[in-house]
Image (cartoon, rainbow, N blue to C red):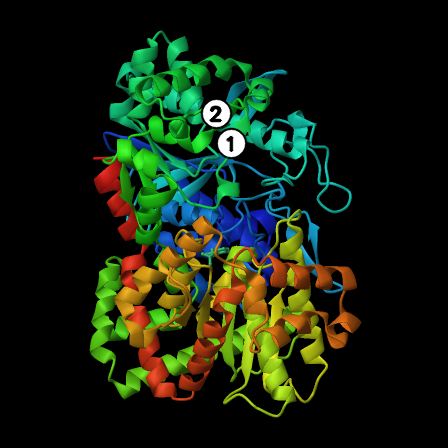
């Protein structure tokens, strides 16, 4: 279709202007309106069974380009905007980014919605309408500061539905207002919905920072994503959020069944509920409760619930496996207590083993245990992760429910993470293998025929170089940084967590700094880029950010070092930054302690954009390594079996590694006079002490292997055509990591949407 006449009509009506007279903000709003109109005309997919994907997070990122791509209007819109003196890239700058997620888990949910719609499957997301999302990160005085991140303006992607539900909290009933975001499917003419529940009268943004009254549930329930949970009020608010989401969501499911004229006694034939991590687990007792209210017996209700619900486990980090004191749940939703006790009683009657209990001896409710007993599928998110769940973490459950456990290796939508963020690479792929890969990503494999084609390899290098120039321009514009775009861009972009080991990467930087100061220059200039937010209450993560920023300052000010080495921390890492960083990356850092990263999805995005991975054999890195082969990835570090053994037997002692001659100077540099002159004494000292005495995630165990492996990668980078070949192989093998593949497997093995 030709969108020009409608766009013209919209700008005349809204602004009494021709499109060519509009500024980027006006053009953005005109395109938003047009896109919303087109989505509204799309029908929902049909199927016998409908999926409800429950998730506390949907890290959508900006939606304009993505939706235009799905509607098949991306190229036309870009060409029109250029004719009018702008571009899609410029206009997209006007869009605030909805950051309704922390990181990988929320981004996975967003990729899944994209793929569910693209495959024409009937499936909606269910979540919460956070007003200030994940905080906006500001870097000031070498520290992270947090600010609210508002994204809902006068006009946004939210569509009012007029639907409300009443959530029965312990303190009284509260209204849940339903807003929708349209999810148009690419290459189809259907659209699904993301359902976001909100309070009726949301609180305004806090005056300063992200502090707010956590006890003012009626107004603040949807203010922020996962508020600081280091105090009781914060943890309680989290339970309020969870119950609000699932109670309203369960009522939505029953309303839609009623509208289709389906008896709730047949619910499980018509409804599949995917529980994305344990945050939505209360859907199990809540849906049970509502079915009892509708006259089903407990046996009938539980049969329906347990054959509708499926659970995805995302972590084996013990602190992330949610468990709530019954006293909390009683305060939030007292009506759930008898149901939870009955669920527990029934589970214990069949399985007396206390390790399988839903409610433990301290009257604490283990959400994952409830999910496993009352779901028909339990999946891990990468082959290694599922293996660890089966053999170690959830072994007692896998022993009694062997058929429930299955693996679904995560994926990413290549529409956002290749077609939209790296259009020139997408075009080169079209030229080599045709456009078929855009609907069938396995066809990327056809690129293997070009692994020896010098012309294609040099095109690949050219495209990478253009993307690097674009990234450096963005860093200059936004943060005033001058980066050498010919340097090797080594990027670690992901949430800051000790298990992801940004601190180990910082030790590499220190090592290079000391070498350069001693006159040993690297074979090429290296730029080590970090993008990472630390949870506001996560003190150690903030100290690691502080260390990185101090190193950045030190090196920036040293003319002997900075021609060879730069450190950059991008401010406010989010989806938009990821879309700029990933296409420009040469070396992708995936260096978590083996067994700790369930899957990772950043690793897949970098690979698909022709970055070569340096990584541990953890999460989906294992599958990446098997696909690309040892010549096309740099792996290092202790194996997951070894690490699991060290934890089991207390066999790791940081100080034994710290004393080594190759390690001690690096760790001690953290409290060197140079760094103490820049940074905060107490924070740097605390980090230093922790690293040499505790080092819970064993950075010192792997750091020597890491440095040697990374040095090898830096050296190999000198042979550009050999490097380009590695990049090409990575792109060719990335089709497996399309979330279209992941979703097809969920549908085939779990959902059976028909
Ligand atoms: C993909 C993505 C993540 C997840 O990265 P991991 O390396 O898998 O942890 C986090 N944040 C953003 C903005 C992303 O796009």
Q: Secondary structure at mark 2?
A: loop
- In the image, residue 709 sits, relative to residue 107, either above or below, namely below
Judge depth for marks 1 and 2 and give the one in front.
Answer: 2
- In the rendered view, does 125 fall on the left or right side of 476? left
Q: Residues within 10 Å of mark 2 (few under 14, many from 20)?
A: some
Q: Residues within 10 Å of mark 1 (few under 14, many from 20)?
A: some
Q: Nearer the viewer, residue 154 or 620?
A: 620
Q: Nearer the viewer, residue 567 or 667?
A: 667
Asked if residue 548 shows in the view, the reply is: yes
Q: Residue at x 63, y 90 (%)?
A: 518
Residue 362 in the image: x percent, y percent? Answer: 54, 24
Real-space Cα separation, disc 1 to disc 2, in angstroms: 10 Å
- In the image, residue 686 sits, relative to residue 528, either above or below, namely above
Residue 212 in the image: x percent, y percent? Answer: 72, 37
Residue 721 in the image: x percent, y percent? Answer: 34, 87
State yes or no: discs 1 and 2 in contact (Cβ < 8 Å).
yes
Q: Residue at x 30, y 52 (%)?
A: 383
Q: Where does label 1 land, which residue?
A: 323
What number is the disc on residue 360?
2
């Amino acid at each position: 279709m030709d969108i020009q006449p409608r766009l013209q009509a919209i700008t005349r009506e809204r602004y009494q202007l021709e499109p060519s007279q509009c500024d980027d903000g006006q053009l953005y709003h005109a395109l938003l309106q047009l896109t919303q109109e087109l989505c509204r005309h799309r029908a929902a997919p049909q199927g016998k069974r409908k999926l409800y994907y429950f998730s506390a997070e949907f890290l959508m990122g900006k939606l304009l380009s993505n939706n235009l791509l799905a509607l098949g209007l991306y190229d036309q819109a870009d060409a029109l905007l250029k004719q009018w003196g702008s571009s899609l890239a410029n206009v997209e700058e006007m869009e605030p980014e909805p950051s309704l997620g922390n990181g990988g888990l929320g981004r996975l949910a967003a990729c899944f919605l994209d793929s569910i719609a693209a495959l024409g499957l009937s499936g909606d997301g269910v979540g919460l309408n956070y007003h200030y999302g994940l905080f906006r990160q500001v870097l000031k005085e070498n520290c992270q500061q947090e600010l609210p991140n508002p994204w809902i303006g006068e006009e946004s992607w939210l569509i009012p539905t007029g639907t409300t539900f009443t959530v029965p909290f312990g303190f009284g009933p509260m209204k849940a207002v339903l807003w929708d975001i349209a999810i148009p499917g690419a290459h189809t003419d259907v659209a699904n919905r993301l359902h976001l529940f909100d309070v009726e009268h949301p609180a305004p943004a806090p005056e300063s920072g992200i502090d707010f009254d956590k006890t003012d549930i009626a107004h603040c329930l949807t203010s922020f994503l996962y508020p600081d949970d280091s105090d009781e009020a914060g943890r309680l608010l989290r339970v309020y959020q969870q119950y609000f989401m699932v109670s309203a969501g369960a009522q939505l499911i029953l309303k839609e069944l009623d509208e289709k004229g389906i008896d709730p006694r047949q619910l499980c034939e018509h409804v599949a509920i995917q529980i994305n991590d344990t945050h939505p687990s209360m859907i199990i007792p809540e849906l049970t409760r509502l079915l009892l209210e509708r006259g089903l017996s407990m046996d009938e209700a539980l049969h329906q619930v347990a054959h509708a619900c499926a659970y995805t486990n995302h972590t084996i980090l013990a602190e992330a496996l949610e468990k709530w004191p019954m006293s909390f749940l009683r305060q939030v939703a007292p009506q759930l207590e008898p149901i939870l006790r009955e669920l527990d009683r029934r589970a214990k009657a069949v399985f007396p083993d206390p390790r399988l209990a839903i409610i433990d001896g301290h009257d604490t409710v283990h959400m994952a245990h409830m999910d496993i007993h009352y779901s028909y599928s339990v999946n891990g998110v990468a082959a290694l992760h599922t293996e660890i769940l089966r053999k170690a973490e959830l072994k007692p459950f896998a022993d009694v429910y062997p058929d429930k456990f299955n693996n679904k290796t995560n994926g990413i939508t290549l529409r956002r993470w290749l077609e939209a963020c790296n259009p020139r690479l997408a075009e080169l792929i079209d030229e080599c293998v045709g456009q078929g890969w855009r609907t069938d990503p396995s066809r990327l494999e056809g690129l293997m025929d070009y692994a020896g084609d010098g012309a294609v390899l040099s095109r690949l290098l050219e495209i990478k170089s253009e993307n690097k120039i674009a990234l450096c321009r963005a860093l200059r514009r936004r943060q005033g940084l001058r980066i050498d775009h010919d340097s090797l861009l080594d990027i670690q972009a992901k949430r800051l967590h000790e298990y992801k080991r940004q601190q180990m990467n910082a030790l590499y930087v220190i090592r290079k700094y000391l070498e350069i100061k001693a006159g040993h220059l690297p074979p090429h200039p290296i730029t080590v880029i970090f993008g990472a937010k630390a949870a506001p209450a996560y003190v150690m993560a903030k100290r690691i950010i502080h260390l990185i920023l101090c190193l950045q300052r030190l090196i920036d000010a040293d003319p002997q070092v900075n021609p060879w080495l730069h450190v950059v921390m991008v401010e406010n890492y989010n989806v938009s930054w990821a879309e700029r960083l990933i296409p420009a990356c040469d070396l992708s850092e995936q260096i978590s302690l083996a067994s700790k990263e369930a899957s990772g999805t950043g690793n897949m995005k970098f690979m698909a954009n022709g970055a070569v991975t340096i990584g541990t054999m953890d999460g989906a890195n294992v599958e990446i390594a098997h696909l690309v082969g040892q010549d096309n990835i740099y792996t290092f570090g202790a194996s997951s079996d070894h690490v699991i053994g060290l934890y089991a037997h207390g066999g790791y002692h940081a100080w034994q590694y710290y004393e080594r001659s190759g390690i001690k100077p690096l760790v001690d540099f953290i409290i060197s006079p140079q760094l103490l002159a820049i940074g905060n004494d107490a924070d740097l000292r605390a980090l230093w002490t922790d690293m040499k005495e505790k080092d819970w995630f064993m950075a010192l165990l792997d750091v020597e292997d890491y440095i040697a492996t990374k040095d090898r990668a830096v050296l190999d980078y000198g042979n550009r055509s050999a490097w380009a070949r590695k990049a090409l192989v990575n792109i060719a093998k990335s089709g497996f990591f399309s979330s279209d593949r992941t979703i097809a497997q969920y549908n085939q093995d779990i959902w059976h949407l028909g």
